[in-house]
Image: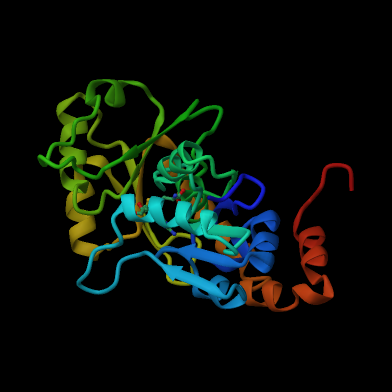
Amino acid sequence: MSTLASTGHVYLVGAGPGPSDLITLRGWRLLMVCDALVYDHLVDAELIEACQAPIKVYVGKVAGRHAMPQAEINALLVSLAKRESGPRCIVRLKGGDPFVFGRGGEEALACANADVPFEVVPGVTAGTAAAAAAGVPVTHRDLSRGVVFVTGHMSGDGELDLPWDAFAHCGLTLVFFMAVSTADRIGRALIDAGMRSSTPAMIVQEGTTDRQRSLLTTVSDLGESVRRAGIEAPAILVIGKVASLAETLSHAESARRGDVRRSDVWSNSADQSVDRYSIASCSHPHA
Ligand code: SAH
């Protein structure tokens, strides 16, 4: 039996919402030194290629087949960590932040229950990043004093059992994940609960990536807009007054982003031009 000292350490690492350079520095360093990597489909291929771990296990969806069941992923992490002469540093790389709809909590519990040491390395969640990339700040002092992250995924019996009355009247920004196929129902449920039909809604597909598509609509046209534009997962729906800021901010943001392309930043990172980029593009109040 393995003792705690010989047990591998599991790192639940957030890869960010898409592009490889949105992983945290801590996550990147772990990726460079780990000896086992377990990853799924929302993770950029550049990160997987950059990792030199001798063990790499893909547990995501492949065309026509479901992802590995969660219980099997949990068991895999524990068995890798407890394998005699097995990997010492196991990175479980997940899209966005591991604890935001990433089932990272279930994997952390599996490790805790099996006495496997683990650490969570947070990531940039699509819930804020994809919205921002489309010109939507999820909070704003004058428009929204908070944000609610919600799953639009139906439960097994096809129900979307959510507090619609509270959502319709709270005045907070609502960010729905996994909601492409339920967008129509979400829009109708909010209006039935009393939300103004003209409330702005932003749909962002593959936010922050080169393939990003975004669409500003209203809550009453949500389902129709998703259908007409052929929106596909991964996408978020951002509902609330802040969505209207995209009219101004999305243009300003894309103009700024045009200055430095992501690939420039990433490919030059070895000669530290990342630092130059950060300095050049941030207007620091004390600079
Ligand atoms: N842990 C992730 C969420 C995983 S659930 C996070 O923190 O971001 C998967 C859902 O996240 C997708 O169905 C979609 O709703 C959302 N998502 C992930 N990446 C996205 C992206 N680049 N743009 C828009 N939505 C995204």
Q: Is residue 162 above or below residue 56?
A: above
**Position in image of residue 24 (x %, y %):** 65, 55
Dividing the picture into quadrants, the one containing residue 196 is: top left
In the depicted view, which residue is nearer to us: 223 or 32? 32
Identify the image quadrant of residue 269: bottom right
The residue that appears at 63% across and 59% down in the rendered structure is: 88
**Residue 38 located left or right of residue 160:** right
What colouring method underlies this structural image? rainbow
Q: Is residue 237 visible?
A: yes
Is 192 in front, or is 100? 100
Residue 216 visible (yes or no): no
Q: Residue at 36% of width from left, 21% of height from top? A: 170
Which residue is painted at 19% across and 62% down in the image?
228
Check the image and report above or below for 82 versus 106. Answer: below
How many numbered markers are drawn? 0
Q: Give the x, y percent position of residue 20.
A: 58, 67
Reply above or below: 44 against 183. below
Instruction: Single out the residue that lies furthest toward the front.
Output: 1
Most distant residue in the left direction: 157
Q: Quick one: 274 or 169, which is closer to the camera?
A: 274
Image coords of residue 121 (percent x, y): 61, 48
- Can you name the residue that lies furthest to the right here? 287
The residue sitting at 42% across, 57% down in the picture is: 76
Q: How far across and how far down the image is residue 96, in percent?
A: 49, 53
Q: Is residue 156 left or right of residue 85?
A: left
